[in-house]
Amino acid sequence: MSVPEITFSKECGDCPIRHRAVCARCEADELEQLEQIKYYRSYDPGQTVIWLGDTMDFVASVVSGVATLSQTMEDGRTQMVGLLLPSDFVGRPGRDQAAYNVKAITPVTLCCFRRKPFEEMMVRTPHIAARLLEMTLDELDAAREWMLLLGRKTAREKIASLLTIIARRETQSKADVLQGSVAFDLPLTREAMADYLGLTLETVSRQISALKNGGVIELHGTRHIVVPDFARLIEETGDDSDGGLLS
């Protein structure tokens, strides 16, 4: 079985998620403290990062790549319950056991912090605690939106919504993300999209083809997607401009 590669060489100032992660508000001296308790782990596609119930001696930020969150039921069935994208936080201070399975679906790099020193630093460093609270509330909002998506939206709206979420996250450093053309690589296979959205593989493929034939998206290969008009993709999600469901 492969084991994660562990490295120690990267510096916070060169980090691609520096201004979006849990350390976004940290001052220079606080970053120096984080440097003392951090290390990097890299995972291959398909490799399990954390098993449900594992004792976690670290928390982490996703630096690059995409991972899935899933839970396994008593009868062995597994349900994907979330995605981890760059800058997302892994683990929970104050809890030493993992609440979900975490599996890499692309090459993934984590910036890991030793859990106990990180918890101690949260007490001393309000910037970290405040940013983690903000990220947690954003995650709660996203979970509520996902409940709406799974419960009320059509298959086409579900696909469009997922593409919108990924596009926003993959291009969030670009000022024009909400207008004009947007391009990104789809990190999920169609099988994974079907699992995540509660659809069949055939339905996912059919709806992606329908969006392509309607000119809403362009598909280059199996994963690279170009959205000529991002506003039009948003219209396909069934949401109004404030994010509410259109009747």
Image (tube, rainbow, N blue to C red):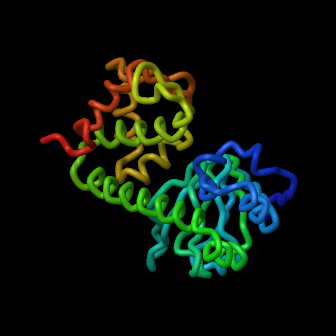
Q: Residue at x 12, y 42 (%)?
A: 247
237 horizontally vs 55: left or right: left
Count of labels in the image: 0
Q: Quadrant of the N terminus?
A: bottom right
Question: Which residue is outermost to the left?
Answer: 247
Residue 9 vertical placement versus 214 (above, below) = below
Left or right relative to 199: residue 235: left
Residue 207 in the image: state x and y as whole percent: 34, 33
129 or 53, which lies in front?
Answer: 129
Q: Position of residue 200 (x, y in %)?
A: 37, 47
Q: Examine the rendered structure and indicate whether residue 10 appears above or below residue 164.
A: below
- Residue 187 quadrant: top right
| Above/below status of 137 relative to 117 | above
Q: Position of residue 118 (x, y in %)?
A: 68, 72
Residue 113, horizontal then vertical, whole percent: 72, 67
Can residue 17 be seen? yes
Looking at the picture, tell me which residue is in the foreground, 16 or 13.
13
Placement of 130 over or under 85, stated as above or below = below
Instruction: State the image quarter where residue 213 is shown.
Output: top left
The residue shown at (60%, 58%) is 22
Is residue 210 visible in this depiction of the protein? no
Q: Residue at image x 26%, y 54%?
A: 148
Residue at 25% across, 36% down: 241
